[in-house]
Amino acid sequence: AQTVTQSQPEMSVQEAETVTLSCTYDTSESNYYLFWYKQPPSRQMILVIRQEAYKQQNATENRFSVNFQKAAKSFSLKISDSQLGDTAMYFCASSNNAGNMLTFGGGTRLMVKP
Amino acid sequence: EPEVTQTPSHQVTQMGQEVILRCVPISNHLYFYWYRQILGQKVEFLVSFYNNEISEKSEIFDDQFSVERPDGSNFTLKIRSTKLEDSAMYFCASRETRGPLNEKLFFGSGTQLSVL
């Protein structure tokens, strides 16, 4: 079984600044995958970034990057140069190697202020 | 970019009634999923579907729920006798191959189900 925990229910950041969202997970899988999803007010789930656990290099996607600490079971998301359009709920999620099911954390509501 | 389409966007029903939520996955995708999100709570896995049968289901997916791919394009979730606690946003998702989930899972915009 997998569990995902996001300890920050809400965060705010000034436009153009950097913010880091925290996520910890627990799994008994030998290999697994980690994801950050964005859910804007439209409530559609949009993949932001993904990380394969066997890869040591942290994933990056433009302004989004992760800090993957496997031993600590930590997977934080860093958003650089925050934009107003980044305002959304952010969900951390994990998947086992079979990839048939995502387990989500409780979400962090991010507000980017002008 | 291709999209997963869900209809309706909002459905209101009376407790005890049957509802069918509809999804049109991306055309070349083979694996289909339903998730739900009760307001203010986590997104929860319900069921996965491949080759016209259920691959995996959660404890939430009890006998009141069923899924079907009635034709080559639609993927439906049926709730036979709705309960108040079934009120939630229901997300359909699809992807092309099963693999180790190293390619993108596409989500639809969701159907908000309100049971009165």
Image (cartoon, helix red, strand yellow):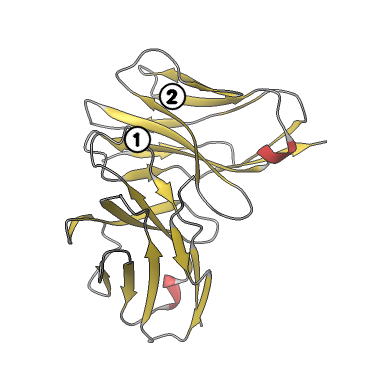
Which residue is denoted by mark 2 in the rendering? A74
Which residue is at 33% across, 82% downward?
Answer: B81
Q: Are marks 1 and 2 in contact (CB under 8 Å)?
A: no
Seen from the viewer's position, the closer of residues B94 and B17 is: B94
Question: Measured from the top left, where is residue B14 in percent x and y?
Answer: 46, 86
For label 1, count other residues whose C-alpha is less than 10 Å away and answer few (under 14), some (14-19) or many (20+). few
Q: Quadrant of residue B23?
A: bottom left
Using the image, determine if residue A25 lies above or below residue B61.
above
Which residue is at 51% across, 57% downward?
Answer: B109
* Residue found at the far top of this picture: A57
Question: Measured from the top left, where is residue A38 in percent x and y?
Answer: 55, 42
Q: CA distance from mark 1 to mark 2?
A: 22 Å
Picture quarter with the N terminus of chain A: top left
Question: Measured from the top left, where is residue B5 in percent x and y?
Answer: 45, 61
Picture quarter with the C terminus of chain A: top right
Using the image, determine if residue B52 lies above or below residue B14.
above
Where residue A91 is drawn, which disc sits there? none
| Chain of the residue on which disc 1 is drawn | B
Which residue is denoted by mark 1 in the rendering? B103
Residue at disc 2, secondary structure: strand
| Chain of the residue on which disc 2 is drawn | A
Given the image, on which type of amino acid does mark 2 rest?
Ser
Which residue is at 45% across, 48% downward?
Answer: B2
> Seen in the image, is B60 located left or right of residue A57?
left
> Seen in the image, is B29 located left or right of residue B112?
left
Question: Measured from the top left, where is residue B68 in percent x and y?
Answer: 25, 69
Residue at disc 1, secondary structure: loop
